[in-house]
Amino acid sequence: MKKYINKLFILGSLLFLGSSCENDAELTTLKAVSFPSEISVSTTKIVLTEDTADDQVLLVSWPEVAFPVEAPVTYALQFDLVGDTSGANAWLKAKRIEVGTDVLSKTLIGQELNKIAVDLGLPIDVEGKLVVRVEAAMDRKVFSNPITLTVTPYEKSVVFGEIYMPGAYQGEWNVDTANSLPAIAKGVYQGYVTVLPGYGPVFKLNTERNWAQFYGAGAANSDMVNMSTKDFALPGEGSFQIKVNLNTLKWTAAPYSWGIVGDGTAGGWDNSTPMNYDYQTKTWKVTATLVPGNVKFRLNNNWTINYGSKNATDGIAYLDDSGAHYVGEGGTYEITMKINDVDPASLGYPPTLTYTITKK
């Protein structure tokens, strides 16, 4: 009997060792991974000004990093001061920009790089040194060798004022109550508008809440001509981010919509229910049927910019927070959201927004 027990023990040990060897073959964390060659930049010396705030000032490119497992690789940029890239706390203060999956380059415009430089503490209007490296991540993170940049940042001017947008989206053309677009730079204004079904897309742009001076369309819809009787036209129904540049006499409209998402909403976790922009209260709103479940807020029907709440009582949601507002009872709800995102391109999105979810 003892002989059979010993044989069973030996057989079990062999099976265990075989299984262990097979599992070892699947382990990848001990295999070396690195960038196959150096990263590159379009320039190493950059003088930033307000005039180049919207220009492409830096292109960072890198080679594809191969991990032992075939899966998407996520890349990001890290910027830091030269003195903060060594020692026990190396790169802990770095500014990180996630680029995306299997993307091998990233272009930065002037205001993006200026914000990074100022946030890291480079002096205004003085040459300073930054370093940039690329992060590649899958089952772990690996980093490229850094490149040193000489950057001269500028101080963004404090601007005031607004321009007005009377148009068919109001239901009636009324410059006294028209949407206002606040200034975000010298001569540059930005805001939001929703064109509801049944309302027209046309509008004018007025410098005051009167008709003493206004702009209409020129040869192209995007051209601004002083006192032109030809209306501008938005692309159609929906919500848009409007940018007006009196320096270049051009304007643009880009699709831009906040929405609710979650298993408490009609679209679940995959499709946002869009909200409409109330230009009079500067608030995003929607009336929707909810079921018991969670509700979060996200921009443009994707997860790049999203907010989640830590509870269902204080009406505050936090940028990139994993939490959500839990709705315990199904029914029709009015949901409002307010966010100070006047100039997200240069200032980023704020850490919080405020909201209400009220059963009707």
Image (cartoon, rainbow, N blue to C red):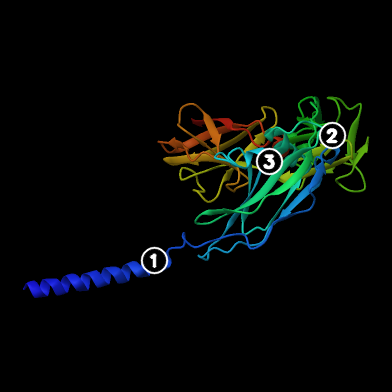
Circle 1 is placed at which residue position?
A: 24
- Residue 23 percent coordinates (x, y): 37, 66
Helix, strand or loop at mark 1:
helix
Circle 3 is placed at which residue position?
A: 82
- Looking at the picture, tell me which residue is in the foreground, 188 or 120: 120
Residue drawn at 50 percent across, 48 percent down:
269
Mark linked to residue 105: none
Horizontal arrangement in the rendering, residue 293 relative to residue 47 (left or right): left
- Looking at the picture, tell me which residue is in the foreground, 145 or 180: 145
Around disc 3, counting alpha carbons within 10 Å, would you say few (fewer than 14), some (14 to 19), or many (20 or more)? some
Sequence order check: which comes first, mark 2 or mark 1? Answer: 1
Horizontal arrangement in the rendering, residue 151 relative to residue 311 (left or right): right
What residue type is disc 2 on? Leu
Residue 22 visible in the displayed image: yes
Residue 360 visible in the displayed image: no
Helix, strand or loop at mark 3:
helix
What residue type is disc 3 on? Val
What residue type is disc 1 on? Asp
Residue drawn at 47 percent across, 38 percent down:
323
Which circle, 3 or 1, is nearer the viewer?
3
Sequence order check: which comes first, mark 3 or mark 2? Answer: 3
Q: Quadrant location of residue 278? A: top right
- Looking at the picture, tell me which residue is in the foreground, 98 or 325: 98
Q: CA distance from mark 3 to mark 1?
A: 40 Å
